[in-house]
Image (spheres, helix red, strand yellow):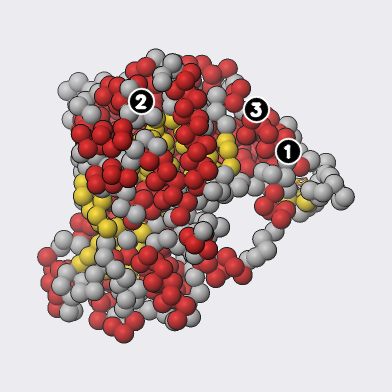
Amino acid sequence: MKEKEIKTVDIPAQKIIEKAKEEKIEIVWDRFEAQQPQCGFGQLGICCRNCNMGPCRIDPFGDGPLKGVCGATADTIVARNIVRMIAGGAAAHSDHGRDIVETLELTAAGKAQGYEIKDEEKLRRLCEEYKINTKGKDKQKLAKELASEIMKEYGMVKGEIQFIQRAPEKRKKLWKKFGVLPRSVDREIVETMHRTHIGVDADYVNILLHGVRTALSDGWGGSMIATELSDVLFGTPVPVESTVNLGVLKEDMVNIIVHGHNPLLSEMIVKAASDKDLIKLAQKNGAKGINITGMCCTGNELLMRKGIPIAGNFLNQELAIITGAVEAMIVDYQCIMPSLPDVAKCYHTKIISTAPKAKFPGAEHIEFHEHKAVDIAKEIVKKAVENFPNRIPEKVMIPGKPIKLIAGFSVEAILKALGGTPQPLIDAIVAGKIRGAAGVVGCNNPKIPHDYGHVEQVKELIKNNILVVTTGCNAIATAKAGLMLPEAADLAGDGLKEICKALGIPPVLHMGSCVDISRILVLLAALANALKVDISDLPVAGSAPEWMSEKAVSIGVYVLSSGIFTVLGTVPPVLGSLAVTTLLTKDIEGVVGATFAVEPDPKKGAQLMIDHIEKKRKALGLS
Ligand code: SF4
Ligand code: MSK
């Protein structure tokens, strides 16, 4: 098929890839090609660098060594490697969450410039969950107490993390039975690093069970904290219209792209961009104004709450610079290619890093601090505005027109669209108009044509009357393909089409950034609780057609461990151990009630999800 042979199905991106070729700019696909053939030991997960007697590698054909110097087998090595990936991903999400908690604390103390508590109702609801007495207390006092309670979740000394209580009773009992209830966020990550040290845990089942516990501390812990407290600070998303693709850049404006994952600075950048003096300066410099756009999940955060247009997902980041129209790309952390400053050198674009924990050689660093967030944001926007006259008009190419979309489907917004309860959704599922729901999420990966896996799989699902909820790079990919418009219901099967038209919603609902997969967990827990069943009984499935990051590994494992069958579009590095592969794709069903499947073909992957959903419907006695 033609799509499989090209680098991307994103048409504006194709034009910029051509431009990169003409201008001899090295981009991600060139480096991917230069890496071929990639290391077979690494692909199978059977190399170990956990101590200096190594590195060791296991011969997958059985002709060479079957054990590392210490005696570790392929099973041990593969299990250790994959849980270290989980720990990396859980750490990234959860540390992001911790940054939000700290800002909430500073906001409560009046020490965070420009921040306020936007969603007091959610703040009060969360306080009640944490058993904080809310009577007679103002939002400042409550925010202080909540931040202090939530901060304890990171290194708690007793009990389990609070949000785990949101899961259905059956699920909690199961997690307890298998000893995987997460005790605190940091503890599980630290214990993963301990267990995988030379000479500690060598039992692959025991190691993987701890991987489950670590991933749960992310999904029902760090990520959920990041989502909930971002809503408290910046507002809970409601449906909002916007636009997407590289065409959101404007030829006559100062273009600023905010990229990464954390909304703390980018929210302030949006504020700073409406500063009258900065707009005047932009006009003085020959631009009509200042155009803020997003990239990856920082983009998703701003899109969800403010309707800020989004320029693209993970594999669009270098291409955005190659348009020649970007005055500054402001980055925080996660999924930021270290190649950006090299690409930017060929244009006038400034790459500005802002997080003390994420610096990039060749980028300018302007450190972000909450106590003078607005001042810093203005300083950064000013740099971009002053850079506009340096733009080289002959190098500018904005490829095509943006696509419209509707985003902003928080759990609260979905329930509101349904009239306040999940019952209409349940009724539609029971009646068979909607066969079930699928969460399709995750990154881009040059191993798969950019966006092809996402778009084809989602189209196939909605065609078969499966409602799709999405976050992260899948959300951006499907939006670019026009699937986030109510009109896209015409591509859905008759039942889903009827429901979408009645509610005026698209068949693909944008639920936010990567940490917002926690919203999907909350929604599923609400559905399972309403039906008095476990999440694993619901006609739902998950998928990550183009995943690449460690965060995606953690997500995959907490989604699976929450009882959701999950299809992966790229192969995780576990095939070097038959035991680990069998456990993850088969035997784990007996533990968490779900398995992983690996299917690079997105349509076949969709079929696996559809079959699973139909199996679950049958088990529930639905037609
Ligand atoms: Fe080799 Fe064992 Fe050291 Fe790993 S921990 S590098 S397998 S000796
Ligand atoms: S941005 S983690 S590439 S989804 Fe959240 Fe996209 Fe994956 Fe990053």
Q: CA distance from mark 1 to mark 3?
A: 12 Å
**Furthest-front residue in this view:** 494
Mark sitting on residue 59: none
Q: CA distance from mark 2 to mark 3?
A: 30 Å
Give the residue drawn at x 68%, y 63%. Answer: 37
- Sooner in the amino-acid sequence: mark 2 or mark 3: 2
Q: Nearer the viewer, mark 2 or mark 3?
A: 2
Q: Is mark 2 within 8 Å of ligand 2?
A: no
Q: Is mark 3 within 8 Å of ligand 1?
A: no
- Sooner in the amino-acid sequence: mark 2 or mark 1: 2
Q: Amino acid at mark 1?
A: Leu
- Sooner in the amino-acid sequence: mark 1 or mark 3: 1
Q: Amino acid at mark 2?
A: Gly
The residue where tag 2 is placed is 432
Q: Which x, y percent locates residue 260?
A: 39, 55
Q: Which x, y percent locates residue 446?
A: 53, 60
Query: SS class of the residue under badge 3?
Result: helix
The residue where tag 1 is placed is 578
Q: CA distance from mark 2 to mark 1?
A: 39 Å
Task: Identify whether 375 is placed above or below 65.
Answer: below
* Residue 593 seen from this side: yes
Query: SS class of the residue under badge 1?
Result: helix
The residue where tag 3 is placed is 587
Q: From the viewer's perspective, is 149 left or right of 586?
A: left
Task: Identify whether 144 is placed above or below 349.
Answer: above
Q: From the viewer's perspective, is 11 left or right of 85?
A: left
Q: Which x, y percent locates residue 312?
A: 36, 59
Comparing 311 with 151, the one in front is 311
Q: Which x, y percent locates residue 35?
A: 63, 66
Query: SS class of the residue under badge 2?
Result: loop
